[in-house]
Amino acid sequence: MVNKGPGKDRWILSAKKVDISADNKSSRLQGVTITLPEYDMDVTSDTGVFDIEGRNLTLAGNIEARGKGFSLKTDSVELNSESNELSSDDKVVLEGNNFRVEGDGFHTTGEKKVMIDRNVKATFF
């Protein structure tokens, strides 16, 4: 599935298994991979729920996002299709070649940044 934005793909979703609800309002996903070209990032998750009407996506279980020079791990993520931003209230670990940042909750911004929301602990090496 591809979510298109103005003149470009905002995200591309693939899943190993998809079950559409009887009312056609949501889809349960297993083995989820999302490519976010704007962030040059891939996100994997055990499961997800896609809200067909709102076009928003909730991911859960062993979430890992990988981009150039970093990885992010958490337990759940919300993807807002309109703003193309990610967020979570769960514990998050962001690691790069010479840093590790931990905290509670994160969100991405329109400036292609990842912001840790609370209880931030950073280690640089």
Image: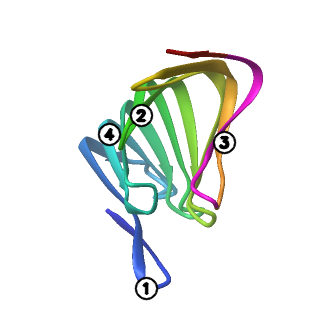
The residue drawn where x is 40% and y is 29% is 64
- Extreme residue toward the bottom, this view: 7
Q: CA distance from mark 1 to mark 4?
A: 25 Å
Q: Amino acid at mark 2?
A: Phe
Cα–Cα span, label 1 and label 3: 24 Å
* Circles 2, 4 touching at the beta carbon (< 8 Å): no
The residue drawn where x is 43% and y is 85% is 7
Instruction: Measuring from the top left, give residue 25's x and y in whole percent.
Output: 52, 57
Numbered disc in front, either 1 or 4: 1
Callout 4 environment at 10 Å: few (<14), some (14 to 19), or many (20+)?
many
Give amino acid for label 4.
Answer: Val
Residue bounds of the magenta highlight: 111-121
Q: Disc 3 marks which amino acid?
A: His
Most common SS among magenta residues: strand
Disc 4 target residue: 32
Going from the N terminus, do you reach mark 1 or mark 3 first?
1
Display colour scheme:
rainbow
**Local crowd at mark 3 within 10 Å, few (<14), some, or many (≥20)?**
some
Residue bearing the label numbered 2: 70
- Residue at horizontal 50%, vertical 60%? 52
Q: Badge 1, how many Cα within 10 Å: few under 14, some, many 20+?
A: few
Q: CA distance from mark 1 to mark 2?
A: 27 Å
Question: What residue is shown with label 3?
Answer: 107
The tally of labels here is 4
Mark 2–mark 3 distance (CA, rounded to whole Å) = 15 Å
**Where does residue 74 sit, x and y in percent of width and height?**
52, 23
Name, please, the residue furthest toward the front: 125
Task: Give the side of residue 84 with respect to residue 8, left or right.
Answer: right
Q: Which residue is mark 1?
A: 7
Depicted 121 relative to depicted 43: above or below: above
